[in-house]
Image: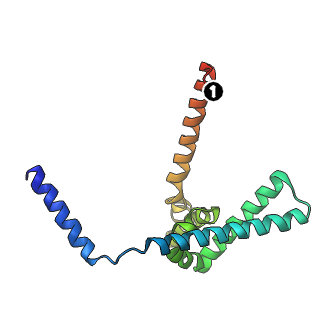
Amino acid sequence: MTGRSRENCNRNYIAYVNSFAPPTKHFKTCGRAFGVGGLICVIGQFFRCMLELSGLSGDELAGTVSILLIFLGTFLTGLGVYDRIGRNAGAGSIVPITGFANSVCSPAMEFKTEGLVFGTAAKMFVVAGPVLVFGVVGGVAVGVLYRLLAIAGVG
């Protein structure tokens, strides 16, 4: 198959698939994602304000708010509510810390029938594991680059 005929075949296939796909409503989808992500942030800010009134500050305050949001995301995942939120909100429910809690909790619940060790524990980080690895490796790479630039006197 020549390059032109392969390209033409790809174009025809994409046109065929697109004829069955419903049109995407980008503005509506982005609006929902923005609204839900913002609502999660507003809930986090509410927790922060209430905890500040109770006397927490600094690292204790930040840690407690994070723990509350992780608990909320895990709790809603356990009830099956977070999946419905995610279906309607898209990235708005995935990006905040509650989405990370959902990505750890969902596989753990799904594979619990395979046992505590080989099911729940082994599959818990199937989704979130690569994100953690990439984040750690990326952070180390940026730190090494920053250090090398500092040694060279650039930064």
Q: Which residue is mark 1?
A: 155
Q: Quadrant of the C terminus?
A: top right
Between 93 and 42, the one lying in front of the other is 42
2 shown above or below 16: above
Of all residues, the one furthest to the left in this rendering is 1
Of all residues, the one furthest to the front in this rendering is 27
**Helix, strand, or loop for circle 1?**
loop
Residue 112 is at least partly visible in this image: no
Residue 102 is at least partly visible in this image: yes
What residue appears at the point 60 percent right and 34 percent down from the top-left corner?
Answer: 143
What residue appears at the point 59 percent right and 25 percent down from the top-left corner?
Answer: 149
Residue 65 in the figure: left or right of residue 85:
right
Of all residues, the one furthest to the top in this rendering is 152
What residue appears at the point 52 percent right and 53 percent down from the top-left corner?
Answer: 131
Q: Residue 109 falls in which quadrant of the image?
A: bottom right
Q: Residues within 10 Å of mark 1 (few under 14, many from 20)?
A: few
Residue 147 in the figure: left or right of residue 21:
right
Q: How is the image coloured?
A: rainbow
Query: Label 1 amino acid?
Result: Gly
Between 133 and 59, the one lying in front of the other is 59
138 shown above or below 146: below
Position in image of residue 107 (x %, y %): 52, 67
Position in image of residue 24 (x %, y %): 39, 74
Between 101 and 22, the one lying in front of the other is 22
Position in image of residue 134 (x %, y %): 51, 47
- How many numbered marks have been drawn onto this rendered protein structure? 1
Position in image of residue 27 (x %, y %): 48, 72
What residue appears at the point 78 percent right and 68 percent down from the top-left corner?
Answer: 47
Residue 48 in the figure: left or right of residue 124:
right
Q: Residue 95 falls in which quadrant of the image?
A: bottom right
